[in-house]
Amino acid sequence: MDAQTIVIAGASGFLGRHLSTELVSRGHAVVALTRRPTSAPDESSWDPYAGVYDREVIESADVVVNLAGTPTLGNVHSRSWARNLRESRVTTTRVLARAVADSERRPAYLAGNAIAWYGDHGQELVTEASDSRGDSLMTSVCREWQEAADPAVEAGARVAFLRTAPVMDGSGAPFKQLRLLTKLGLGARLADGRQRMAMISLRDWVGGAVHVVEHDDVSGPVNLCCPTTPTNAEFTDALARALDRRALLVAPGFAVRAGAGPVAGEVLGSINLRPTALEDSGYSFRDSTVHEVVRTALA
């Protein structure tokens, strides 16, 4: 693969840092978009809320990646949290989509998104061809988030939507918190535990994203998840066994709904997800099952 110039919004975040490191190690040049003034050659200042960015930086890019957005962990009952969650993703996606559309080179655009786009599908097999259901908070955010990339799509750029499952790694949420609870003997199945709980290891998320960057034939929705989606009960048991603990507790559905509030649909919903686009384009997963994902996250 020839070396490319990749511009990344959200490069200082958890996923952005790891993706940037891997891309550089593979010989690519990474330029991080930052909200602060900078003169560093591998950084460029921008203000998405004012629509301000360096047009030459976008013009020189082969690929633009947007991973910007406020943290998903927070006070789910707060209106400001929900507003920032939506606006930070939609605004940055739209500004960069228009920047791609207005450029002469039309770089590829990898627009971050999440598997909440699908909504609750029960035990039904879900691929990139599946529909979006329901109107929970995260599902509605993901729809707007994706629609914000329309200018780049309409301009004919290669656009891929990175529909990311929860990324399991010992240094980040949600795995860090779940590991602590389980070690304390507080690991618990959510309701009946039969809901499918899609996930992916950090190294497969990075590997999958790099694969999309480097393969010009990959576009449209791309599910970033492990090939075999466990149930919540299977994940809870796998984590407990790996930590030499027992997970006998159950969090009742009514308690989860009360605590999770507007994101209860995502917590209790089921998405039996498959990474069809990645597999069909030749990506080989390193962690395909829940036990492999947990083992890698703990390592």
Image (cartoon, rainbow, N blue to C red):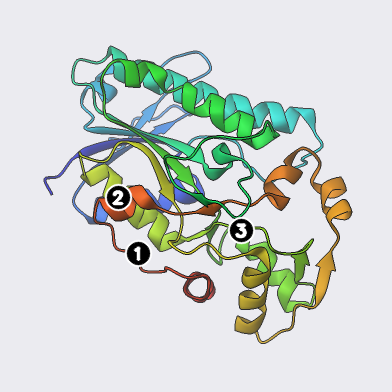
Instruction: Check disc 1: other Cα within 10 Å, few if <14, some if 14-19, many if 20+.
Output: many
Residue 45 shown left or right of residue 76 in the figure: left
Q: Which mark is residue 285?
A: 1
Give x and y (percent) for residue 271: 58, 51
Out of 176 and 265, give the one closest to the viewer: 265
Q: Residue furthest left?
A: 2
Give x and y (percent) for residue 122: 63, 51
The residue where tag 3 is placed is 196
Measuring 53% from the left and 44% from the top, which residue is drawn there?
Answer: 115
Q: Secondary structure at mark 1?
A: loop
Residue 125 shown left or right of residue 2 in the figure: right
Q: Is residue 125 above or below residue 191?
A: above
- Viewer-side label of 1, 3: 3
Q: Are the residues tagged 3 and 2 within 8 Å (C-beta)?
A: no
Q: Secondary structure at mark 2?
A: helix
The residue where tag 2 is placed is 210
Q: Give the mark nearest the N terminus, 2 or 1.
A: 2
Amino acid type, mark 2: Val
Amino acid type, mark 1: Phe
Decide if residue 165 is in sight here. Answer: no
Amino acid type, mark 3: Arg
